[in-house]
Amino acid sequence: MTEGATITATGLRKEFTLSQRSLFRKPPRVVAVDDVSFTVAPGTTLGLVGESGSGKTTVARMLLKLETPTSGSLTLNGHDVLGSQTPEQARTFRRTVQAVFQDPYSALSPRLRADRIVGEPLEAQGVEHAAIDARVAELFDQVGLGREVRHRYPHEFSGGQRQRIAIARALSTNPKMLVLDEPVSALDVSVRAQILALLRSMQERLGLTYVFIGHDLAIVRYLSSMVGVMYFGRMVEIGAASDVLRQPLHPYSRRLVAVASGATRLGDHRITGDLPSPLKPPSGCTFRTRCVYADERCRAEIPRLRVVGSGQQVACHHVEAIRDGVKPETGPLGGDA
């Protein structure tokens, strides 16, 4: 078994410049990710959860170097991956970190046979054709498809089989880390369990490190060692999956878990409300416009992650009082600072 990678993100921030709306004003900028930090140990999984627009996928794209952070640092096995790299260092990174995306239908070229799709990364690395053929056949066996079907085209496979092909492609270069961006959300329920079991067995066999982006908390709990909860571009809680998903501490995490468990309906007053506008984010705690515990301190001061209880890190001024049931409901708190 090969050793997985250690990935460490420190203070990641990503700003996007929108199209210019006026000749007399600077184009607006939107902060998609703000001050996100975490470390994923070899052979473990960090699950990132949160509503659409919370910044999960932007974090994933930065980990894959598909987006360049505005600021912050990212290291892989202690080596900086955001600074200038030689061509060989860049190729090594591409071999080490691979991705499996959400939609198995758009991820595969319909014009190429499955064996060519899986072997493409090896071709790019200059591997000889005979070695590529042997490796592709081995990978089709590993992902449960069988080497005899590798000459078919993508349209001849089901959705679950296509995702197995995408996984085989990701494994072709013997990576140490996979970024999994909702890899089962487009699949039928009956197929999801099979793909998740495959991902778990591969991690145990190969020692892979995973960063798993998901919205289904049951799936995240099954696959993750640690869970990070994101809201409006910030990490609001992070810790062991067993702690965060069973005894969440941040008000937002508590609501996500309550909705997922069926304990609270989406129409409940504690859940309603949309994400604030990225063009005009709230001052202080960005969750104050939806939080029943918000007060003037939440409007004035940005909460920072700090260790609470058994080791969870939580970004909330009043987390202890909320946990102990002594914090009165004083919000939500809208309006500008």
Image (spheres, grey):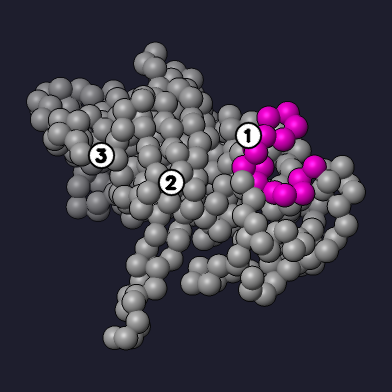
Under circle 1, the secondary element is strand
Image quadrant where one finds the N terminus: top left
Circle on res. 12: 2
Q: Residues within 10 Å of mark 2 (few under 14, many from 20)?
A: many
Instruction: Give the vertical position of 84 relative to 300 (above or below).
Output: above
- Which mark is first along the chain, 1 or 2? 2
Left/right placement of residue 46 relative to residue 144 reads right
- Which mark is first along the chain, 1 or 3? 3
Where residue 63 appears, as percent x and y from the top left, is: 37, 42
Residue toward you, 134 or 292: 292
- Residue 78 visible here: yes
What amino acid does circle 1 point to?
A: Gly
Under circle 2, the secondary element is strand
Residue at 37% across, 37% down: 74
Where residue 231 appears, as percent x and y from the top left, is: 59, 55
- Taking the magenta stretch, the answer to whether it contains residue 314 is yes
Residue toward you, 257 or 162: 257
Start and end of the magenta stretch? 305-320
Instruction: Give the vertical position of 48 relative to 76 (above or below).
Output: below
Q: Which residue is mark 3?
A: 83
Residue at 50% across, 36% down: 38
What amino acid does circle 2 point to?
A: Leu
Instruction: Count all numbered tags in the image, as a single digit.
Output: 3
- Taking the magenta stretch, the answer to whether it contains residue 42 is no
- Where is residue 15, by image quadrant? bottom left
Residue at 58% across, 29% down: 225
Q: Which residue is mark 1?
A: 239
Evaluate if marks 2 and 1 touch, with contact meaning CB atoms under 8 Å apart. Answer: no
Q: CA distance from mark 2 to mark 1?
A: 18 Å
